[in-house]
Image: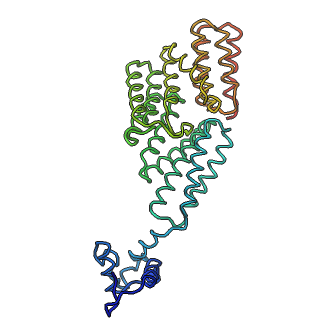
Amino acid sequence: MLAHGDGTLPDREHVLRRWKAWESGESTPGGRYQALIAKTFGTTRYAIFPAPHRPDETADGGMETLEILTRLQRSDVDVATLDALRITVDRLCAEYSYRPAEQLLIEGREWLGRVAELQQRRLTLAQHQEILVMAGWLALLVGCVEHDLGRSHAAESTRRAALSLGVEAGHGEIQGWAHEMRAWFALTSGDFRGVIEAARAGRVVAGTTSVTAQLAAQEAKAWARMGDRRQVELALDRGREIRDALPYPDNVAHHFVVDPAKFDFYAMDVYRIIGVDSVAESLAQEILHSGFAERAPMRVAEAKITLGVVAARTGELEAAVEHGQRAIGDGARRSIPSLHLAADELAAELRARYPEERSSREYLDRVQELRTEPG
């Protein structure tokens, strides 16, 4: 307890008023009270109240330690604001799979700008870190949409910004997703060794998190296209083990969450490439008949192409072309680089097996037209 010089105790209101004045920087407790306050918190007086400085000690214009600590303890951003921002970021990430890319890009950039403005406000250290994390998720989302629209240079710049935010916030999962984006970009550009290097870099920083399972799936995709079945199975097994070790996600619609169905979507691509058609077809059918299909048009498109590839390999030309045409033509929401990659695989099958068939040539022409369409 804090006592007056005569041994009596000050009343509660007096103590509260003096304490608030100290916290706001209006005054500093006297030496006796400094010692009592420090003892209350189990430390020494000068750990909380630095000794007065001489005039030449702050010639550089720096603040005293007490003033710095006091400023760090203050914030003009309330809890409700951060809660609302967190909900908005989650909503945008959940809308990735179906919302028109241009709309999502505009709103994502707007919110990223608002988050940047918040960093100029007075924040506690915890709030500063939380805002960095939310900015990181938004940057990841914006970079993904930019890549979907075929804006590769902008997407790479945004990806690097997200990685930097993840490093600054000490957030391994954001860093892992930035590396996963690098793997995805490399995959769609044909740099399969780059995919493997990015996946390995992501594993180092991400730990056992959702992104680690997707990194394994991306690595499996690359090994499949390089023809290494052994490495494909190792990568898929690693991804499944990680996914099984994690709890089932609260929000499977969130783009930066990997639930079992999403992992199976990646596995479908792998089995299609290595020619395990029965498994690829089964996984594609699961995607098309899932309750989530209507809110995942990009998954649906690649599932239809998978069925097209399987049909082409079994001599069903018309079915193959029909699946392919629907995949290319259906839906406004699509990832142009990923759709090109899958559509080209069906085109290669048709070109090799049915080079002279009219329906085959029509599909090949449609794939060529796809390359000239704006994102």
Dividing the picture into quarters, in which one does residue 188 lie? top right
Q: Is residue 340 above or below residue 31?
A: above
Q: Compared to 277, does 139 lie above or below?
A: below
**Is residue 202 toward the left or the right of residue 289 in the image?**
left
Picture layout, residue 228 above or below residue 38: above
For this rendering, which residue is in front, 249 or 218?
249
Q: Is residue 144 left or right of residue 7?
A: right
The N terminus - image quarter = bottom left
| Direction from residue 238 to residue 322 in the image, left or right | right
Q: Nearer the viewer, residue 220 or 264?
A: 264
Q: Position of residue 97 (x, y in %)?
A: 61, 35
Residue 95 in picture, x, y percent from top left: 62, 40
Would residue 319 be found to the left or right of residue 136 on screen? Answer: right
Query: Residue 348, image x and y in percent?
Result: 58, 15
In the figure, 180 relative to 130: above or below?
Answer: above
Q: Quadrant of the C terminus?
A: top right
Q: Residue at x 41, y 71 (%)?
A: 69
Quarter of the image for residue 341 reads top right
Residue under the image location 39 percent in, 76 percent down: 66
The image's colouring method is: rainbow
Q: Please provide percent x and percent y for residue 216.
A: 43, 30
**Viewer-proximal residue among 343 and 316:** 316
